Image: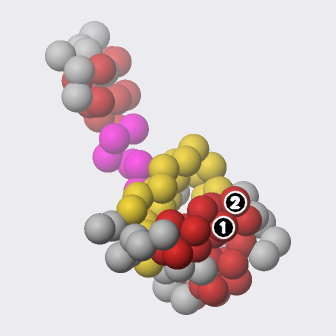
């Protein structure tokens, strides 16, 4: 089966890659990681590239240096939060619920 790792932030990716490699050793078919903030400091991209991670998904809340995706072996994918933030601002301005954006009613 597939395994999914979720974290708030990826900095040097040491712990993340160790966890992914261990999950693979224990039988995971594929390992994916999701994080809100991708710092990708120092050896992070190289670690991700060499790791058992299939893909790492992060948001664009941090401006990434050029080449981050390429240096990771194209394992990193960056998703925009623009639409979510725009809708939150619109809802706040119109005094509408913001919690519905997160599945709450």
Q: How many marks?
A: 2
| Above or below, comparing residue 70 to residue 59 in the picture | below
What residue lies at 18% left-to-right and 16% top-to-bottom? 105
Question: At numbered mark 2, what does the secondary structure look like: helix, strand or loop?
Answer: helix
| Above or below, comparing residue 35 to residue 14 in the picture | above
Find residue 79 and report its horizontal and vertical position in percent.
41, 61
Q: Is residue 84 magenta?
A: yes
Residue 100, can we see it? yes
Disc 1 target residue: 18
Report the residue that reaches farthest toward the right: 42
Q: Is residue 3 left or right of residue 46?
A: left
Q: Does the magenta stretch include residue 30?
A: no
Is residue 14 or residue 90 the one in the foreground?
14
Disc 2 target residue: 15
Whole-number angstrom distance, CA of label 1 to CA of label 2: 5 Å
Q: Are marks 1 and 2 in contact (CB under 8 Å)?
A: yes
Residue 62, can we see it? no
Find residue 3 and report its horizontal and vertical position in percent.
39, 62
Image quarter for residue 19?
bottom right
What residue lies at 66% left-to-right and 67% top-to-bottom? 18
Q: Quadrant of the N terminus?
A: bottom left
Is residue 4 or residue 11 the one in the foreground?
4
Q: In this view, does 33 lie to the left or right of 42?
A: left
Find residue 10 and report its horizontal and vertical position in percent.
65, 56
Find residue 36 and report its horizontal and vertical position in percent.
52, 48
Report the residue that reaches farthest toward the left: 105
- Residue span colored magenta: 76-85
Question: At numbered mark 1, what does the secondary structure look like: helix, strand or loop?
Answer: helix
């Amino acid at each position: 089966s597939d395994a999914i790792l979720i974290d708030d932030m990826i900095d040097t990716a040491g712990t993340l890659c160790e966890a992914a490699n261990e999950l693979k050793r224990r039988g995971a078919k594929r390992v994916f990681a999701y994080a809100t903030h991708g710092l990708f400091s120092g050896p992070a991209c190289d670690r991700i590239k060499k790791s058992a991670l299939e893909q790492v998904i992060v948001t664009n809340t941090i401006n990434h240096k050029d080449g981050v995706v390429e240096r990771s072996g194209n394992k990193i994918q960056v998703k925009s939060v623009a639409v979510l933030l725009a809708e939150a601002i619109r809802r706040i301005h119109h005094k509408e619920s913001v919690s519905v954006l997160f599945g709450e009613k």
